[in-house]
Image: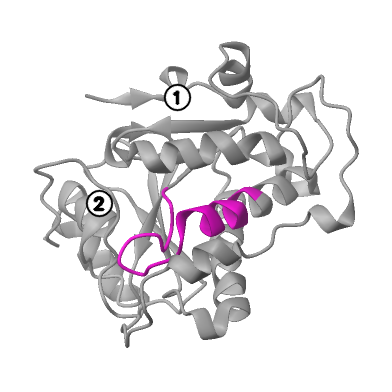
Amino acid sequence: MLVRLADIKTIGQLFQTGVLKAAAKHRYNANAGFLDRVSLFQGDITVMEVDSIVNAANRSLLGGGGVDGAIHSAAGRKLVEECRTLGGCETGESKITSAYRLPSKHIIHTVGPVYLRSDLETRAQQLESCYQTSLNLAVQHNLKHIAFPSVSTGIYGYPIEDATHIALDVVRRFCDSDAGSKLDRIIFVVWSNKDKEVYETLIPEYFPPQDATEIPSPSDKPTVDDSAVETAAPEAPVSEESPQIADVPPNTDVKAP
């Protein structure tokens, strides 16, 4: 079943219905215009009828597990044929292809970092770049919609809360930039209830409702959650070529075509 843009609630609508609630503190001033241009959607990214969806790819771009495998499987063999012409992709970078059998028009493939506690600053910068380069590609190709999964939070091990802070901060800064008005909708797509709850908690800090008046201070910029670092899985030699596994629908075929 297709999910059309009109079916996806904006965060403004989620505030109105009480799904999102104002945060005690927020990191940016309220901007009413942004509330109609950002969405949170729980479901299958492969059935979204929008201008572009983002694939959490590995560096080969030839398919893997999780979201990557689901997108390749749904798009068909022509996707991997086009990806073979791109020469792979470096961590933190993004490349664009057609979407083939998917209802979206394009796929933006981005390669997230493997989480590493001994190199947090570099990995955070790479994850920021995933979101920023994806947004840049959407604008360069005159697209109006982009839907993001939670990049690097599967087998690559990035703690969901830290990753969500990064995603929301990059998107908020993009909305504040000159290029921000060129996209009509930016959609955060989650599958699990846990990830949905994290986004619902953090979105109001970055996109506060209209009645929020507190002015954020410089100290409110996102930081690494020390508790997440302490409870993260022990460091292990994970290859960045490993397929990323994210939450995907049961019985989804995640093998590359």
| Crowd band around label 1 with a 10 angstrom C-alpha radius: few (<14), some (14–19), many (20+) | some
Residue 94: numbered disc:
none
> In the rendered view, would you say 222 is above or below 3?
below
- Quadrant into which the N terminus falls: top left
Q: CA distance from mark 1 to mark 2?
A: 19 Å
User: Going 58% across and 16% down the picture, which residue do you hit?
Assistant: 13
> In the rendered view, would you say 233 is above or below 119?
above
Secondary structure at numbered mark 1: helix
> In the rendered view, would you say 178 is above or below 204?
below
- Quadrant into which the C terminus falls: bottom left
Asked whether, in this view, residue 39 is left or right of residue 97, the answer is right
The amino acid beneath tag 2 is Ile
Q: Residue furthest top?
A: 17
Secondary structure at numbered mark 2: helix
- Residue that badge 1 annotates: 5
Question: Where in the figure is residue 81, as x and y percent of width and height?
Answer: 21, 67
Magenta-drawn segment: 149-168
- Residue that badge 2 annotates: 71
The answer to whether any part of residue 140 appears in the image is no
- Is residue 211 part of the magenta span, yes or no? no
Asked whether, in this view, residue 114 is left or right of residue 163, the answer is left
User: Going 22% across and 66% down the picture, which residue do you hit?
Assistant: 63
Asked whether, in this view, residue 218 is left or right of residue 222, the answer is right
Question: Where in the figure is residue 75, as x and y percent of width and height?
Answer: 21, 49
